[in-house]
Every structure is written in structure tokens, then in C-alpha cells.
Image (tube, grey):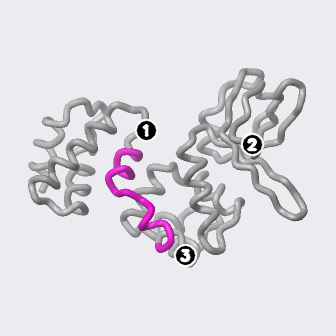
């Protein structure tokens, strides 16, 4: 199986790219989220790949981040969700937004994605809810996993839970505390803000 491809970005559209890897052109289907992260045409590009094999075709789906590929593969395990639907979901919501929607049982948010009906959204929530860590979901919503502010958010959530707040309430308190903040660098400050929002 192909895990990733690195090559020159020969062509790009919001739904598919052509990656030139040592003279071989790979057609790779992408989400809008990945499209937004692509470099200029002609630049070197690396995509994490999901190699989808069917009886009648072999398709490549590419993602700018491993987390997006992982979520795509989780969506494929949901009954009734195929690659096209999974890509639609990830084009309409970032991994962080989708994780939060699943953690919050927010069927309405998921069904607002073009091509995703209420029943499919309900299945996504029901089948993936136990696989989503609400703390990780909140951290992911604030930015990429290598973003240092994610550690601050996690520390604040854990501090609130150690003070006796239920996980759901702690998550809502931190969400409120983060609203309007552009730079989250100190867990003590965030904790104080969160305690003032309850």
C-alpha cells in the first residue's frame, strides 16, 4: 500500500491533484481542507495517501496531514459512508470541527455539509462517538496537533477535571474561555478565565 507520495505538484483543482513523482503522474483526490494547504503549482508537495482498492478501480486519496487521513479512514468504517461522502465531510469541516461535532452529538452541524443527510450524520456520530476523545477534539479544533497551545488547552481541561468538574462541563468552560483569544500560551491564565465563565 502507498503511505505517502512526494513529488512536484503538476496540476491542482479543489477536488483532485496531479502529482509528478519522478516522471510518473499520480491522480490524487483531495478535500478542500487539503487544497487550502497545498503549495503553488510546480512546487514540491507531500501527501499522505489512502489507497482505495475496488473491483473496478484503484483510487488514491491524499491529505496534507496524517490526522485528516486518519479521520477519513474512520469515516470509511461508518456504515453507508464511502470515499466520496467521507471526502465531502472533510471538505465541509476540518478534523477539529468534525471531532467536536461528534463529541457534542451535533448531528445538525455534520448534516449541514453538502451531500450528507441527517441519517448519515447520525450514523457518523453514533459509530465514531466512542473513538473521539473530547479533550483531544477540543485541542484539535484550536489548530494543528503540533501547535503548542494544544498542550495548554489539555492542561487546563485536566486541571478543571481534577477540581471536580465533569468532562463535558470542563470542555464547555474551556471553549468559552478560548472564545476571542488569539494567543493561548499560559494554562494558568486560561484556567482562571475558564473558572470565571462557569
**Mark sitting on residue 2:** 2
Q: Position of residue 3 (x, y in %)?
A: 69, 41
Local crowd at mark 1 within 10 Å, few (<14), some, or many (≥20)? some
Mark 1–mark 3 distance (CA, rounded to whole Å): 29 Å
Marker disc for residue 118: 3
Residues at marks 2 and 1, CA–CA distance in whole angstroms = 23 Å
Residue drawn where x is 75% and y is 40% of the image: 13
Of callouts 2 and 1, the N-terminal one: 2
Residue range (magenta): 126-141
User: Height in image: 78 above or below 180?
Assistant: below
Q: Which residue is mark 1?
A: 145
Helix, strand or loop at mark 3: helix
The residue lying furthest to the top in this view is 43
For label 3, count other residues whose C-alpha is less than 10 Å away and answer few (under 14), some (14-19) or many (20+): some
Residue at the image point whose x is 47% and y is 64% from the top: 109
- Which label lies toward us, 2 or 3? 2
Magenta span: chief secondary structure: helix
Amino acid at each position: 500500500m502507498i503511505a505517502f507520495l512526494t513529488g512536484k505538484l503538476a496540476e491542482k483543482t479543489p477536488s483532485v491533484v496531479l502529482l509528478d513523482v519522478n516522471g510518473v503522474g499520480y491522480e490524487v483526490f483531495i478535500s478542500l481542507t487539503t487544497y487550502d494547504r497545498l503549495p503553488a503549482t510546480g512546487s514540491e508537495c507531500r501527501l499522505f495517501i489512502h489507497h482505495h482498492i475496488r473491483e473496478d478501480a484503484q483510487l488514491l486519496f491524499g491529505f496534507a496531514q496524517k490526522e485528516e487521513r486518519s479521520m477519513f479512514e474512520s469515516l470509511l468504517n461508518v456504515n453507508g459512508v464511502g470515499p466520496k461522502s467521507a471526502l465531502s465531510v472533510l471538505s465541509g469541516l476540518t478534523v477539529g470541527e468534525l471531532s467536536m461535532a461528534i463529541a457534542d452529538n451535533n448531528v445538525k452541524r455534520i448534516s449541514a455539509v453538502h451531500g450528507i443527510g441527517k441519517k448519515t450524520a447520525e450514523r457518523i456520530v453514533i459509530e465514531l462517538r466512542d473513538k473521539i476523545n473530547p479533550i483531544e477534539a477540543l485541542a484539535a479544533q484550536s489548530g494543528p496537533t503540533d501547535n503548542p497551545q494544544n498542550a495548554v488547552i489539555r492542561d487546563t481541561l485536566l486541571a478543571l477535571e481534577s477540581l471536580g468538574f465533569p468532562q463535558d462541563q470542563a470542555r464547555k468552560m474551556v471553549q468559552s474561555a478560548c472564545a476571542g483569544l488569539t494567543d493561548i500560551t499560559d494554562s494558568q491564565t486560561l484556567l482562571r478565565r475558564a473558572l470565571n465563565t462557569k
